[in-house]
Amino acid sequence: MDADFLVEMASREPTEELLTPERLRGLAESGARLVHYIGFEISGLVHLGTGIISMQKVADLQRAGVETQVFLADYHSWINRKLGGDLSTIRRVAGGYFKEALRVSIKIAGGDPDRTKFLMGSEVYEKLGIDYFTNVVKVSMDTTLSRVRRSITVLGRREAEALSFAQLLYVPMQVADIFSLGVNIAHGGMDQRKAHVIAMDIGEKAFGYKPVALHHHLLPGLGLDQEAWRRLVEAKKAGNKEEFSNILVDVKMSKSKPETAIFIHDSEEEVRRKVMQAFCPAGEAELNPVLEITRYIVFRDRVEPFEVVNRKTGERVTFSSYRELEEKFKERRVHPQDLKAAVAEELVRILEPARKHFTEGPGRSYLEDLKEIRITR
């Protein structure tokens, strides 16, 4: 395995953090079998962040020769009472719509869905039996209660909320998943960082090795408001990672806020409408939701120039790189509405395979099944 190429693929955007490039290089140079995993709760529709951004890294790691795995966390979803807290429904959606949506997303991101193993959490636990329970206990013995509570907060919960005892098991289970599967590249969004750091901290002592952790960028929701945006920017500039992470978890693109999220199978009209209504402050590039999509999705592996049309003058301006576009936007030489129109059309094109798959192809029954479940619950 080419260690340099592996580190390059693991580090490139949308990666925000790789802990650490040196250890990943060491694994590659030692000839170790490289096993990746990313876990997902099962709830509603798959959006750009869950589908495209996450699967971009899966595609990158595949190119470097890593074994990629997607963990369908049905028990974790049950603990957090997703889909009405019905475990049988969670499993049905996990093995149907959700798996299908991620397979399509991998393909859009340039990867091969057939080279990614999909694992249902409950099936893994049944197979491992007492060994999995032992691993949960090992993690729990080496982790304080206060640290578990802080990690749950980063997963989107407030410390002031009353937690069930099952929710306290969430993080030890998540960490135990990594070692139970023999994973040495733990992957997730930045909101999963604290759980992965626990795995790194206790791994050597409890399981004999320390995994590498890879965290990708989280897209902000399209409905980000001025006050939340200001707080995010200030926290980032101040280098306050804790505050930044906590705010971002609240405002990230989320299936629970459908008007501020673009789902991979949205209609052309829905994509255009949502983008045209998105928060996009003129001249501001930092954490601008529309520019985020432009940077991480539209310009991802792009070869041809990106064109923006001035709708007042009809002037067409082409950009060969995201940085070039960002600079012109910051100089207010690109109007937000013109940028939105161009980005909307690009997203319509990029998401066409998913849209067709779920409206005309074999994915149609899965999407209809999920919508029926959501209507009746």
Image: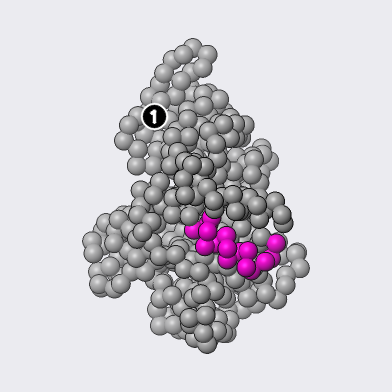
Q: Residue 247: in sight, yes or no?
A: no
Left or right: where does residue 357 sit relative to residue 93?
A: left
Instruction: Indicate the quadrant where residue 240 lies.
Output: bottom right
Which residues, given as a range, are shown in magenta? 84-99
Coordinates of residue 368 in the picture (x, y in percent): 59, 49
User: For residue 18: magenta?
Assistant: no
Note whether 190 is above or below 128 in the view shown. Answer: above
Coordinates of residue 336 in the picture (x, y in percent): 55, 27
Coordinates of residue 154 in the picture (x, y in percent): 61, 61
Left or right: where does residue 171 sit relative to residue 60?
A: right
Identity of the amino acid at label 1? Phe
Taking depth in this image into account, of 262 and 240 the one nearest to the observer is: 262
Note whether 368 is above or below 169 in the view shown. Answer: above
Q: Residue 226: in sight, yes or no?
A: yes
Residue found 39% across the figure and 71% down from its top: 184
Q: Which residue is mark 1?
A: 306
Question: Which quadrant is home to the C terminus?
Answer: bottom right
